[in-house]
Image (tube, rainbow, N blue to C red):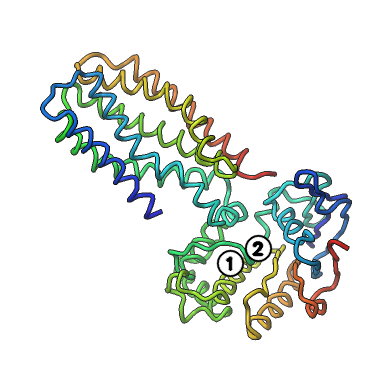
Amino acid sequence: MWELCCQSLGKRFGERWVFRGLSLQVAQGMVLMVRGANGSGKSTFLRLIAGLLAPTEGYITLCYQGHPVPDRHRWLGWCATDGALYRELTAYEHLHWWATVRGLQWEPAARADILMTHLARFELADRAHERVRAYSTGMRQRLRLALATLGAPPLLLLDEPDAGLDAAGLRLIEQVIDEQRARGITLFATNRQDAECWGDLCLAMGA
Amino acid sequence: MRQGIVASLLMGVVTVVGVGFAVLGEALEAGLQAGLFWIALLFGLFPALARGFITEEETGTADLLRVGARPSAVFWGKWLFHATLYLLLSIVLIPLYALMIASLRGDLFGWLILWGLGGFCLVSVLTLCGALVARTAIRGALLAVLTFPLLLPLLLLLIAGTKAALQGQSLWGVVQGVLGYAMMMSAGAAWVFERVWREV
């Protein structure tokens, strides 16, 4: 059973506090919607959880069976709209590289099939061997989602993953969230008004 | 990455060819030959090595690495790429140097040891300094300030050693010095990198 806890969390850039005194607890199977206008601190909050920024005050703990796990970034999937991809690599190469980096262990013979099946889920199999520089905005976003969900991480952080996606892409996000409910925690930052139905909890930033 | 390799090769070749034409037909003394040898390699390495991490930060892929990979894997992965570039540069520049500036003579085994140890140290220093400055706003100035005190003693040692190799003298004292520097860098660079790579 996974659990994410934030205690009195605060982040300040220079003299400006983005947020302060944020405490929450999200248990396995739950989806936390992080909502707010541009600049309200949604991305900053997710970057703190991902370990890409240090909190100015407070602390964050990811627990498994009640025990804090060290190096929580090892257990998370990260998808951000501004998250970069390597333009010279193909989608398949991205997944192959990511699987190696994350230490995902598969039979060498089955590895290619697993990666291609994963890409097919995100409707990228047809162009799996094309370089990312030739991809549209929506395809790049699908690839970011594919990378974030590879290996089924228990903590999934989605920072405006719906940006640039068409209706089919949005359905895909719904599926990803539904699957994640069964195995872990999802934090989903968005400023869409109609996305509330995807979450079990809602955190309004800047309110 | 490709641009960095091309820039490095171009810089190194232009340095050797430019100096080669400037000293054409002149008999250079051993100290000058040794200095030109290392400066040509350093000039070639600098554009790619110093920018390795800066490019990752500028394109945003550094965050992907921070989330996914262990800091030590990132450091040694970059180090390996930079070491390969050093090898590639040496394959191009050393014959060119021998052709245009001065032939490699004296203690060739000594040259080889210094080339290996010197390369290890140069690559480690530049990889570490590139990582240190990548997240700062004043990268150019900071890179110069950081690399100068780290590179200067190393370059002086390497030039002194290469001069001794050219004259067929004993290298042992210099090799000991460079070896100590290499050991310090191999332990220190990876340790420092782990502490600066993630803000937390």
Q: In this view, does B8 lie to the left or right of A195?
A: left
Q: Position of residue A101 (x, y in %)?
A: 54, 56
User: Element under label 1?
Assistant: helix
Numbered tag placed on residue A77 in the rendering: 2
Residue type, mark 2 in image? Gly
Which of the 4 quarters of the picture holds residue A57? top right
Task: Say which of B56 and A112 sits in front.
Answer: B56
Q: Reading the chain from its start, which is encountered first: label 1 or label 2?
A: 2
Residue at image coords 16%, 24%? B105
Which of the 4 quarters of the picture holds residue B11? top left
Contact, CB < 8 Å: mark 1 with mark 2? yes
Q: In this view, does A82 lie above or below B166?
A: below
- Residue topped by disc 1: A147
Q: On the rendered image, what quadrant is the N terminus of chain A found in? A: bottom right
Of all residues, the one furthest to the front in this rendering is: B22
Within-10-Å neighbours for mark 2: few <14, some 14–19, many 20+: many
Q: In this view, does B97 lie to the left or right of B69?
A: left
